[in-house]
Image: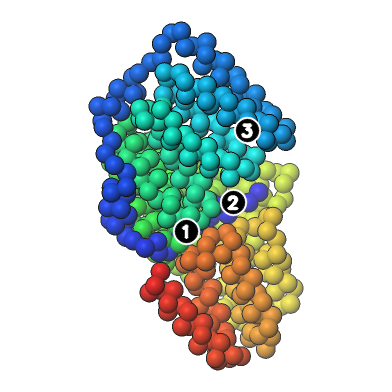
Amino acid sequence: MKLAGGFARARRAAASFSIILAFGAVLTGPIDNAAAQDARTRRAPAQVAGSTQAITAQIKNAILVMRGGKIDAGHAQLIAALDAADRLDDAQFVMEQYYEATAALRAVKRDDLAEKLFVRAFQTKASVQRPPGNADVLLEYAILLSDHARIAEAVPLYMKGIAAFNAYWGEGSEESLIANDKLAVALSTSGSAASATNLGRHNFELSEKALGPDHRTTWKLANNYADSLREIGAPAKALELDLFAIEKRAKHYGENHLNTLVSVNNTGQDFLALGRFDDARRYFRRHRAIATAMAPKDPSFAGQADAWLFYTDMLAAGDAAMPPADLARLEAIVANEENFADFLRVKAAVLAAGQHERRGEPERGMRLRETALAISTKAFTAQHPLSFEIKLGIAVALIATDPNRAVQNFTALDREMFDG
């Protein structure tokens, strides 16, 4: 099972957190709190109940049709049912159906149709009434856009959704905090490290204050804030947060739980970044014990921990020449997309590249660095800090073999740093 999303998640987006908030404030427009309260308590007339039940059944049937592979037929049924829903005097019901319909389209890999449906949702008379369901649909629309690396289009929608969550449930509510966290993760994934980290800190501190340190959302936000800190090169602070998350998660979920495992692995990565290899090994062994208990019949699950332990040993050895078998194992990790996290695959590729270069094999080293960049660009973005680090390594490696190209690469990196 791949846990890449849990183990590693930025770099610039054009703005600091404060600028993003200002940008969002301009684009979201005001949310009428009184209208929000009214929408929350509004109930459809009793005679509409039969109609809503019929429409719900139609939408469920349309979803089943799409899951059966008849996408166009199911989509047509969805549109007909949604049109019927919008003729009812139940705005919340309508937005709930759009939420279900877009989720169904995304599940069958038709994001193109889902996006059109999101646009359609906000052309309905129901959306004009601003029911609470608007917030959920806005958030999912923003997530779709950010999943397709359209962060500039996504941010205003995130901000509108967050403003709606704040109006309906309050700024420190779990709903609002989770929406803010989705934005932070999207910024991180798009390469906006500073913005993601600032927002992550804001979310975690507000959750501690509003929900308390023993709330599960607080632990989740601690985990995601730590991810951002690790990415900007602040593993010591990330370590504090990951240790906090481990304590809370292990007590609540138990030791042998996926959430505990994720925090344990992240803590191992913190120690690795700090050069505390013995501590890193201790946590990766703990990761292995949890994985073995969770999936005793699936060696690949514990094998992820074995890969981290092996990588730790290779990294701790410094510039010493690796035995050929170890170098081959390192490259096998790079090639195994199915079983290993993208972050580990990138790190293994860079470490193996250095070994080949020290052996006088610069071509093999460069191929591995280019592989690392391809993995990072696909899994994260070309602007992600990890991608930038790899591009810098490529430029440095080129000094020995192609100085002119090295200069070109350094110049491009300068532009990337200051023009982004």
The first of marks 2 and 3 along the sequence is 2
Residue 234 in picture, x, y percent from top left: 39, 64
Say what amino acid the circle numbered 3 marks: His
Which residue lies at the image location 32% right of the left edge and 60% below the top edge?
Answer: 16
Regarding residue 272, the answer to whether it shows in the image is no
Which residue: 60% across, 19% down?
57
Is residue 295 visible from the viewing direction of this image?
yes
Q: CA distance from mark 2 to mark 1?
A: 19 Å
Q: Mark number for residue 190?
A: 1
Q: Nearer the viewer, mark 1 or mark 3?
A: 3
Residue linked to disc 2: 3
Q: Secondary structure at mark 1?
A: helix
Q: Gap in Å between the C-alphas at discs 2 and 3?
A: 33 Å
Left or right of residue 190, residue 291 in this image: right
Placement of 411 over or under 211, stated as above or below: below
Q: Which residue is mark 3?
A: 75
Secondary structure type for disc 2: loop
The reply, left or right, for residue 58 in relation to residue 206 is right
Of labels 1 and 3, earlier in sequence is 3
Point out residue 251 in the picture as x, y percentages from the top left corner. Answer: 46, 39
Q: Amino acid at mark 1?
A: Ser
Residue placed most toward the observer, 334 or 144: 144
Q: Earlier in the sequence, mark 2 or mark 1?
A: 2
Q: Do the residues bearing badges 2 and 3 touch, measured as CB atoms within 8 Å?
A: no
Q: Quadrant of residue 400?
A: bottom right
Left or right of 331 on screen, residue 284:
left
Please report the residue visible at 35 percent of the width from the left and 45 percent of the height from the top. 159
Type of amino acid at the residue the image marks with label 2: Leu
Helix, strand or loop for disc 3: helix
Q: Is residue 218 above or below residue 355?
A: above
